[in-house]
Every structure is written in C-alpha cells, then in structure tokens.
Amino acid sequence: MQSIREADQLPAALIALRAGGKSLALVPTMGALHPGHMALIEEAKRRADRVAATIFVNPLQFGANEDLDRYPRQEEQDARMLEEAGCDLLWLPRGEDIYPPGFATTVSVKGLSDRWEGEARPGHFDGVATVVAKLLCAVRPDIALFGEKDFQQLAVIRRMTQDLQLGVEILGVPTVRDAAGLALSSRNAYLSADERERALALPRALNEAATHIREGVPVADALSSAKDSLGAAGFSTIDYVALVNALTLEPLEAPVGPMRLIAAAKIGTTRLIDNIAVEV
C-alpha cells in the first residue's frame, strides 16, 4: 500500500492506480478504524479494481462543544489495518491541503440536513458535505463507500453528489455490529464497560419498535416504548427516536413505503446513533 501526505503527490499516485483502465473505489474515513471500516474496504475491493482510502479528522463537522480534540487518533494502527485489508493507496491530507488559507466555500444540502442530526448538531452536515465534495473532486473515484450506520449522512452525500453532478456512485454498506449487537463506532472507545453494556439498549429498543410496528402497534406507541426503554437503561438524553421515510428522512406517523427507524441518545458523555430498516 502506498501512503502519501503531500497533495501534489496525489495526481501521479492516482494515474498509477488507474493504469490500464482500472476502476477506482474511495473509502473516506476520519481514522480510528474498526471492523466496520474494513467492511467498507472489502466491499470496495469487490466493486472496483483498485481501492483508495483517506484519513482526515475534519474540523468543519465538529461543533463548538464537541470532541474534536479528543477524537481518537491511531494513525500507525489504521495504516496497518488498511494495508492488511488490501487497500492500495492511503492519502492522509493535511489541514491546509483541504482548507487552504482564505478558504471560504461551504457546501450545504437543504432539506435532508435540516432534521435529526442536523437539528441536534447545527452545521455538522455542511462540514460533512464540504469535505466529502473536496475529497471526491481530488480523488475522482468511480465509486465511494459509506456505512449505513450514519444513515442521514449517507443520504446527504448522495444528494450532494447528484446535485453537483460529480459522476461518482455512492454506495451504502450495511452497519457492522459487535457480537452483542452494538453498532461499531469510533466513539465506542469512550464508553466504560458498564456504559457499553447499557448501550445495548439502543439496538434492542429499535428492534423492539420494528417488531411492534410490524405487528400493527401504532407508530407513536412503538416509539414511546422505545424511548422508555432507553431511559430505563440509563440514557441521559434522547435526541430522537423516529420512523422516517428511507429516501426523504421525513417522519412517518404510519408505516408506508421504504422505512428506517433512527435514533440518537447519550449515555454518560458519549452520544450514540443507530438505525435499522423496517419492512412491513
């Protein structure tokens, strides 16, 4: 695997990867890699001839009171994991490569960004859309892969890519969970052993709500029961538990069309998000 830091080294590295008409997949990350990221690399290898990954902790998507400074950074371990997974190129851009002096442009995706995470974390999706647009324009992959765990992020990136006509296929990869069912996340590292155990109430609550909805329980009652379960497990703040249209992310009062149950809640000092598909 080739690792590069300097932006001026990237064009030659990409030309070499694409030699002979090879297709290219991109997996953008913020590092602190785990098996969920490796699932993205594995799917990328199935979908394209060559695979590139990026590691960049994007300051633009962190709010004033969020965890940019303590976000886990483990660059050597991440690079080793990517190489063992079969990644061909790792780009570790510097902050000034992505946001050079005088940088004044922000990409904003209206509608899809407004609710849920957008409401809980103002400006977050502007930061996500901006950095992903920059990375896609720099690497010019045929496809880019993102995890379904960040389901709203996936929807925002798809819309942004279509609207800006970037010519990149955006592929969502199913959420990877640990043996107990907790969705893998870099922020799980913040959980104590007790908090990790109690955090399992989040996927349980979503699965129970999905079962209730399939059985004909009114959506409002199913969501209320899920929130009660989270509160009983020790989640201190519940930002939302909602049934939404899987394409528009608009809330649903009754099951119809493609659906997703989404949730965000805080246990201890760690804010967790999760989602599952619902089929009736």
Image (tube, rainbow, N blue to C red):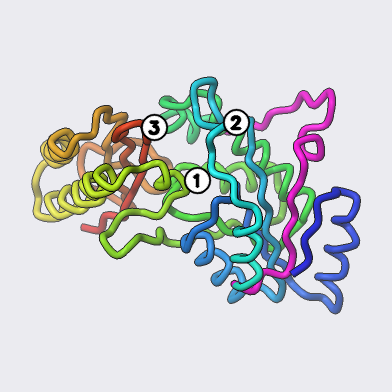
| Residue 182 to residue 103: above or below | below
| Residue 178 to residue 269: above or below | below
Which residue sits furthest bottom?
20
Q: Which percent across, then down, holds residue 198?
A: 22, 45
Q: Is residue 30 left or right of residue 24?
A: left
Q: Which percent across, then down, holds residue 127?
A: 61, 32
**Can you tell which quarter of the image residue 249 is in?**
top left
Secondary structure character of the magenta stretch overall: loop
Q: Is residue 36 magenta?
A: no
- Pointer 3 residue: 116
Classify the position of the N terminus by image quarter.
bottom right
Look at 64% across and 74% down and name the residue there: 86
The residue mark sitting in front, 1 or 2, is 2
Q: How many marks?
A: 3
Range of the magenta residues? Answer: 85-109
The alpha-carbon separation of the residues under discs 3 and 1 comes to 12 Å
Look at 74% across and 64% down and name the residue there: 89
- Residue 169 appears anywhere in the view: no
- Pointer 1 residue: 155
